[in-house]
Amino acid sequence: MGKTQTSRRRFLKKSAAAAGLVAAPPSLALAAEPAPAAEPTRSILDNNSLESVLYGRRSRFVNTTREVEGRSHYDTPRIRPEPYRPSARTPLGELTGTITPTSLHFTTQHYYGIPDINPAEHTLLVEGMVERPLVFTMAELQRLPFVSRIHFLECVGNRPNPRAATVTGTHGRMACSEWTGVPLSVLLSEVGVKNNASWVIAEAADRGKHTKSLPLAKALDDVLVAYGQNGEPVRPDHGYPLRLLVPGFEGIYNVKWLKRIKVVDQPYLSFQEHSRFLTPDPKTQRDAYDFGPNSVITQPSGAQELLGHGLHAISGLAWSGAGKVSRVEVSTDGGHTWQEAELAGPVLPKAHTRFHLPWRWHGEEAVLQSRCLDERGQLQPTEEEYARYWGLTRAQLYGTIQSQLGYCNWIQPWKVSADGKVTNGLAPTDVVVDVHG
Amino acid sequence: MVSHRPMSWWTFTGSPIAQRAAGAAIAVIVPLGAALHAQEAAAPSGLGRAPTAAEQADRIIGPDGAELPPGSGTPAQGEMVFGRRGCSTCHGPTGSEGPSIQLVGGDVTTRTNYWPIRHWPFAPSVWDYIRRVMPYDRPGVLTDDEAYAVTAYLLYRNGIIGEDDVMDVESLPQVKMPRRDDYVMPGEWTPDTPRGFEIPPTR
């Protein structure tokens, strides 16, 4: 870098001389050289390093990371997978727009860690009740017709949580990306599905050979076999080199490290999925599919602070597994009155939609919350409505793991105090159990 | 994306003749042992190949056990395999001590997600998991007979079959798991099916 500066100075001098610009009066002929420029700071050097040219980085003033999940379920003395790989949530409170930066997209797996897969050796087998079972290489899959779709991904374990301090803690097991890949319907027409088939089983190449049953009707609808995420190959975190993307459905359907699709005539209820179908209430089985309408305010949200009175932009996300968000309403008075929020950006089906509402804060205490109406006409419920539907007390609601309840999409309020500090507005509760232990 | 060669971009509306020619060329390069007779008309794209025998043999077994391979095992044999193959290292000498998942005994609660074997809905699924996924560090190393034996052992220890019951391709699917009737099978889904639970607003 110093070398560059010196040559630049030499260059400037030479060209100035050539242009006759250095014809200084004799009294100035012996003027001292310009003071040497200060040595570049470490930050300037980093910003201009070859590494940062090859693979861009964020400003050193931006250091948002995913939030690592607690280790508790690994410490529960029944599981001992090695290597241990914690899950982590999306830092929603620090993000904007609708596309989650890939490196901050939540990551999770069911105990068996992230495999290391060589794409040159990885294949996808499509078999079962088909005319001709086929094995495709990654290169072949990328020669097939493809689509790109923006969709959210969410774990059924996402749930408003009175004991979480931030929106990451309450809603961080979700993210939204652009997924590129072959429609599963194209692959199924390649193999020729037989008439009496009604389900498909998707299998992962992770250690646990995770399998999930999926209705054939959904497989033929909008399911993708995706190899691209936000323009680049899917990351190992998210299923490199191939994953299933089941728009709007519970996260567990979205099998990562996809190696096989088996066409069958019944759901298999395998190890990872059968717990969903033995629950306190049979009503939940009918709803083990697409997520209902949901929304949450991300700014201002828990553990953030309003700096100053006056105009603020209440910002958040709304989404629905059924399709598009129709309307988002925001209340600043604990749900007594509601205003319709503005939907920023494109409103896409089964994708995060950013909403915002300008709000003038005059230092009063306030309770902010949002609710979503989806295109199916379903409205996001309150926690009380949700508990009453299942006939549960509050303690029972939070004492039951999420996969036993179904999609926990109730409204998440944030409390603003007179000094501008924001806290979780759900009433406190002693115990909140979690799918992760 | 997966190699440094430029990806070959072509549209699906390319000449069908060219596609079939490409398909024919690829279909010739089929590994030995592939069931060529099962390859009916070529796939529309001409891509892909038939699975090898090894790929076909790696089956996911469904709830009715229709694709279980030949083989058999008894609880006594299973106890020996459980020790010899190192299952006890993770699951404990009698399958309930841990540190890994409890295989014998144990309860379902609303506070956990992964339940012990006796609460599983289907017996063939137990065989499938053991054969395909276990042991944790070398999945698939058990033979089919060993998988039947270990399955028999665990079903016996959980009080589901008798000490002398032989588990094989016919008897295993007949075993009724004690909680089978507590499971509600997932309902039908279509793009227009109303969502299972819809919470009516009270306001």
Image (cartoon, coloured by chain):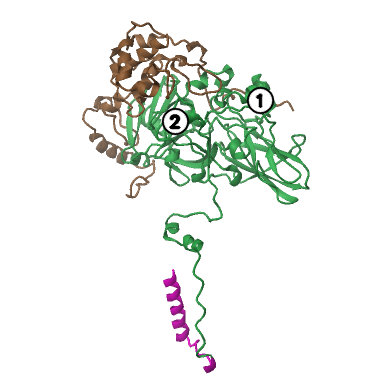
Which disc is residue B147 wearing?
Answer: none
Q: Mark 2 belongs to which amino acid?
A: Tyr
Query: Would you identify the image quadrant in which residue A255 lies?
Result: top left
Tell me how many marks there are.
2
Query: Residue beneath label 2, please?
Result: A111
In the rendering, what colour is chain B? brown
Looking at the image, is A408 positioned above or below residue A265? below
Does A230 sit left or right of A91 as displayed?
left
Q: Do circles 2 and 1 both sit on a common chain?
A: yes
Q: Is residue A331 visible?
A: no
Query: Residue beneath label 1, please?
Result: A386
Q: Mark 1 belongs to which amino acid?
A: Tyr
Query: Would you identify the image quadrant in which residue A422 lies?
Result: top right
Quadrant that contains the N terminus of chain A = bottom left
Magenta stretch? A1-27
Among the two numbered marks 2 and 1 on one chain, the one whose residue lies closer to the N terminus: 2
Viewer-proximal residue among A212 and A31: A31
- Does A18 appear in magenta? yes
* Badge 1: chain ID: A
Looking at the image, is A162 positioned above or below residue A420? above
* Cα distance in 3D space between marks 2 and 1: 30 Å
**Neighbours of disc 2 within 10 Å: few (<14), some (14-19), many (20+):** many
